[in-house]
Image (cartoon, helix red, strand yellow):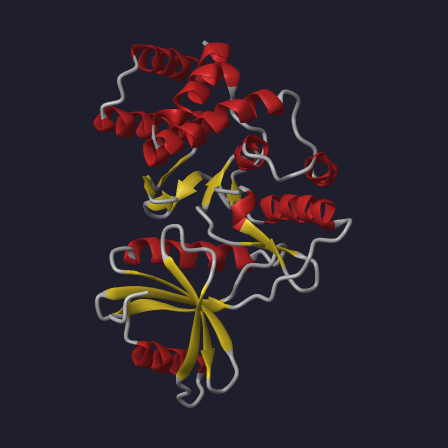
Amino acid sequence: MSAAVDLDRVARSIAKARGTKFSPIVRRETCSGGCIHQAEILLLADGSRWFMKSNRAAASMLAFEKQGLEYLGAAATLRVPQVLLQEDVGDWSVLILECIERGRPGATFFEEFGHRLAALHRRMSNDRFGWFADGYLGTTPQPGGFDSDWVRFFRDKRLRFQWQLLQRRGIDSTELWRRLDVLSGRLDDYLGEPRDPPSLLHGDLWSGNYLCDADGAPVLIDPAVHYGHREFELAMPLLFGGFPSKFFEAYAESWSLAEGWEDRVEIYQLYHLLNHVNLFGDSYLEACLRILRRFT
């Protein structure tokens, strides 16, 4: 991380947030979690350890992450890192979180994970779909606002938004545009309005966005929160792997899934794949077309 980050100011902010005396940072360790932001573990002279994300141009992203962690934590179903502070330090924006000691998943880790995720979705509900303000999925903007109609929300604020971003990138695929247009017109038939109320979703639940703590319990990190149909949450775990079948079985045991959810999840996966085209390039384009060919 650039020396431009004033670690003395960071340490003073930590002391103020904790209500303790100033304790200087005596060591900093670069760690994983820095795909978008720079990530470090800070060791203070008083022996406390803190996880810091920092970035020169991402104050709104870190503020959104802070809000998401606080909402998920309020559910008291799955552990998330506690937020100490998020603020600007000079030209940098920093997010200081509890530093969670990692452990190894036990034999029942994924069953517990599935049960707790279902509890999160059931406990944290809303009367409309969406979020209070614009957010992010990775570095991609994710429109906020609320809508009482899930199909309309998913079509306009998710699928078509990714489509517009791809058009701005100049993706040359007549088939993609044609099939996206056809699918957009058929979403009511394929998805329908869910019978469940909007649930608070992590929003980006792939294998890199959870960890196992020292007690062997699952911990959610790096959220892209919004209120949505809970089936949407299962798209990423099924798309990129890392979640065994017992995770989904435990979820359904706690809160049963409606018939045909596997098909609907594939449409939700399309949203994530379109985002991957936007973020990482055309190598994900064929995967998008495979889903579109099936439904159009």
Which residue is outermost to the right? 107
Q: Can residue 149 be seen?
A: no
Q: Is residue 97 visible?
A: yes
Expressed as whole percent of the image width and height from the top left, the position of residue 263 reads 58, 20
Question: Does residue 194 lie above or below 126 as drawn?
Answer: above
Number of numbered discs present?
A: 0
In what quadrant of the picture does the C terminus appear?
A: top left
Horizontal and vertical percent position of residue 44: 46, 81
Closer to us: 73 or 270: 270
Q: Is residue 21 left or right of residue 238?
A: left
* Residue 21 against residue 150 in the figure, above or below: below
Residue lying at 34% horizontally and 36% vertically, measured from the top left = 279
Horizontally, residue 182 falls left or right of residue 246, namely: left
Image-quadrant location for residue 66: bottom left
Which of the 4 quarters of the picture holds residue 63?
Answer: bottom left
* Residue sitting nearer the eye, 275 or 43: 43
Q: Position of residue 92 (x, y in %)?
A: 26, 65
Q: Residue at x 24, y 70 (%)?
A: 4
- Residue 242: x and y in percent read 61, 39
Q: Which residue appears at 70% of the width and 45% of the height?
A: 110
